[in-house]
Image: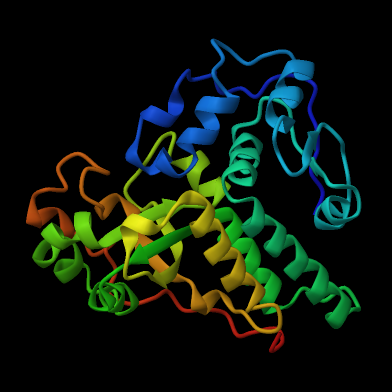
C-alpha cells in the first residue's frame, strides 16, 4: 500500500478543538487535546514533533511502497502532512498503541504465511477494523446479541435507557473518524463486540490491552464477517432528532440484514 506525502496542507481547514464537536470523538479526545491544541495547522516540523512526542512510534513524512512493512521494520509511520485521515491514524496510535501494534503484527504474520502476494481474509479484516472499526464494550450480553442480529428498534428504542449504563462505543477506525467530521446518515462502523461485566473498571489502558489480545488471538484466522455493522448515528445524542422512535424507521440506514459479502479469496 503506497501513501504519498504532499508538501502542501490538506484542502480541509483546521478545526480547533475538533474533538469536542461530536460524541464519537471521545475515543481520541484525550490524545487530541494533548497533541493537537493548535490555532491552525503548524509547520511540518512542529506537526511531526507534536504527533511523535510520547508515542510508541514516530510519525514521518515519507513516501513508501510497503506501508505495514515500513512500520514493522523502522518504527516509523508514514504520515501525510496536514491530512485529517493520517492525523486520526496518529491519534489512534496514541490512544491504542498495543492494538495498533497487534494489527501490524497480524499483517506481517499473514504476509509471511500466505506468500505470493496474496492478501487473505485476515488482512482484509484487519484493514477494515483499522479504517472503519468501532469497539463496542457491553456489560449486558443481550444488547450485544441485538447488534449481532441487527435488531435496531429493540437496541435503540426499546433498550435505549440501558445503553447509557450498559454499553460503550469507542470509534477506532481512522477513516471512520475522518468521516465523522462531516457526519451523514449512512455512516456505519464495523464493530468488534466485547463483553465486560464491569464497565466502570475499564480504563483506557485496559481497553487497549483487551483489544490487542483479541487481535492477537486472530493471528491465524479472522474474516470481515466477524466485525458487525453498527449504524453509529443511532447512538443517543450522536445525531439530531434520533430521540424520536420514527428516526429508526429508515431501513436504508438501519438495515436488518448484511450486504452480501464476496466469497473469500482464501481461508486465512
- Location of the C terminus (image quadrant): bottom right
What residue is shown at x 8% (from left), y 56% (from top)?
A: 245
- 235 to 268, vertically: above or below: above
Left or right: residue 209 versus residue 233 is right
Task: Pick whichever, 187 or 199, lies toward us.
Answer: 199
- The image shows residue 212 at horizontal and vertical percentages of 61, 65
Task: Pick whichever, 144 or 184, lies toward us.
Answer: 144
Residue 249 visible here: no
- The image shows residue 243 at horizontal and vertical percentages of 11, 48
Q: How many marks?
A: 0
Left or right: residue 221 versus residue 76 is left
What residue is shown at x 34% (from left), y 54% (from top)?
A: 232
Quarter of the image holding residue 81? top right
Tell me how the rendering is colored: rainbow
Residue 230 visible here: yes
- 214 to 96, vertically: above or below: below
What residue is shown at x 45% (from left), y 60% (from top)?
A: 135
Question: Which residue is farthest front?
Answer: 201
Amino acid at each position: 500500500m503506497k501513501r504519498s506525502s504532499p508538501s502542501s496542507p490538506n484542502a480541509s481547514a483546521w478545526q480547533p478543538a475538533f474533538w469536542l464537536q461530536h460524541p464519537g470523538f471521545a475515543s481520541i479526545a484525550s490524545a487530541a487535546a494533548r497533541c493537537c491544541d493548535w490555532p491552525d495547522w503548524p509547520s511540518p516540523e512542529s506537526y511531526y514533533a507534536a504527533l511523535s512526542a510520547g508515542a510508541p512510534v514516530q510519525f514521518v513524512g515519507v513516501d513508501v511502497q510497503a506501508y505495514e512493512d515500513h512500520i514493522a521494520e523502522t518504527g516509523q509511520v508514514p504520515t501525510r502532512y496536514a491530512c485529517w485521515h493520517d492525523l486520526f491514524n496518529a491519534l489512534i496510535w496514541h490512544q491504542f498503541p498495543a492494538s495498533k501494534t497487534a494489527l501490524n503484527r497480524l499483517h506481517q504474520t499473514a504476509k509471511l504465511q500466505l506468500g505470493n502476494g496474496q492478501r487473505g481474509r485476515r488482512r482484509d479484516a484487519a484493514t477494515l477494523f483499522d479504517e472503519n472499526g468501532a469497539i463496542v464494550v457491553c456489560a449486558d450480553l443481550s444488547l450485544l446479541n441485538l447488534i449481532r442480529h441487527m435488531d435496531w428498534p429493540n437496541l435503540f428504542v426499546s433498550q435505549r435507557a440501558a445503553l447509557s449504563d450498559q454499553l460503550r462505543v469507542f470509534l477506532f477506525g481512522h477513516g471512520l473518524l475522518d468521516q465523522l467530521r462531516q457526519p451523514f446518515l449512512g455512516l456505519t462502523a464495523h464493530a468488534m463486540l466485547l463483553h465486560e461485566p464491569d464497565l466502570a473498571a475499564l480504563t483506557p489502558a485496559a481497553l487497549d490491552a483487551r483489544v490487542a489480545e483479541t487481535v492477537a488471538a486472530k493471528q491465524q484466522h479472522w474474516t470481515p464477517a466477524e466485525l458487525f455493522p453498527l449504524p453509529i448515528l443511532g447512538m443517543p445524542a450522536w445525531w439530531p432528532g434520533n430521540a424520536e422512535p420514527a428516526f429508526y424507521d429508515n431501513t436504508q440506514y438501519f438495515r436488518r440484514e448484511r450486504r452480501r459479502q464476496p466469497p473469500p479469496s482464501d481461508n486465512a
